[in-house]
Image (cartoon, rainbow, N blue to C red):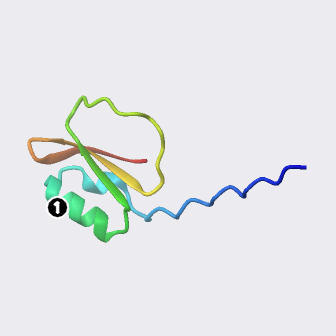
Amino acid sequence: MAVMAPIPTPAAEPQDSPDSYVGLAAEDAERRARERGWSTVRSLPPGTFITMEYLAGRLNFEVADGTVKRCWKG
């Protein structure tokens, strides 16, 4: 009988609303996200092709003209 390793438990995400970042300057939003405990913060220009895998602890920003236009977890 093969013994399998336990499935790792993902770290808890910060209790934070992505909507609270919309409208902020990108630099301010990134700093705030890191202060609130997000392990990965990713800024992307509109229309960027990205993979759809979910990464716990990651916050994504869509940034245009230096301002966060959209924000989502994963």
Residue at position x 18%, y 50% in the image: 23
State the residue position of label 1.
28
Q: Provide residue 37's location: percent of width, then percent of height.
A: 37, 68
Q: Provide residue 31's location: percent of width, then percent of height.
A: 22, 65
Q: 21 or 47: which is nearer to us?
A: 47
Q: Provide residue 52's location: percent of width, then percent of height.
A: 44, 35
In the image, residue 69 sits, relative to residue 57, either above or below, namely: above
In the image, residue 1 sits, relative to residue 32, either above or below, namely: above
Q: 3 or 61: which is nearer to us?
A: 3
User: In the figure, is residue 14 to the left or right of 8?
Assistant: left
- Helix, strand or loop at label 1? It is helix
Q: Provide residue 50's location: percent of width, then percent of height.
A: 35, 33
Q: 35 or 2: which is nearer to us?
A: 2
* Direction bottom: furthest residue: 35
Q: Amino acid at mark 1?
A: Asp
Residue at position x 13%, y 54% in the image: 25
Residue at position x 24%, y 28% in the image: 47
Disc 1 packing (10 Å; few <14; some 14–19; many ≥20): few
User: In the figure, is residue 23 to the left or right of 1?
Assistant: left
* Direction right: furthest residue: 1
* Direction front: furthest residue: 2
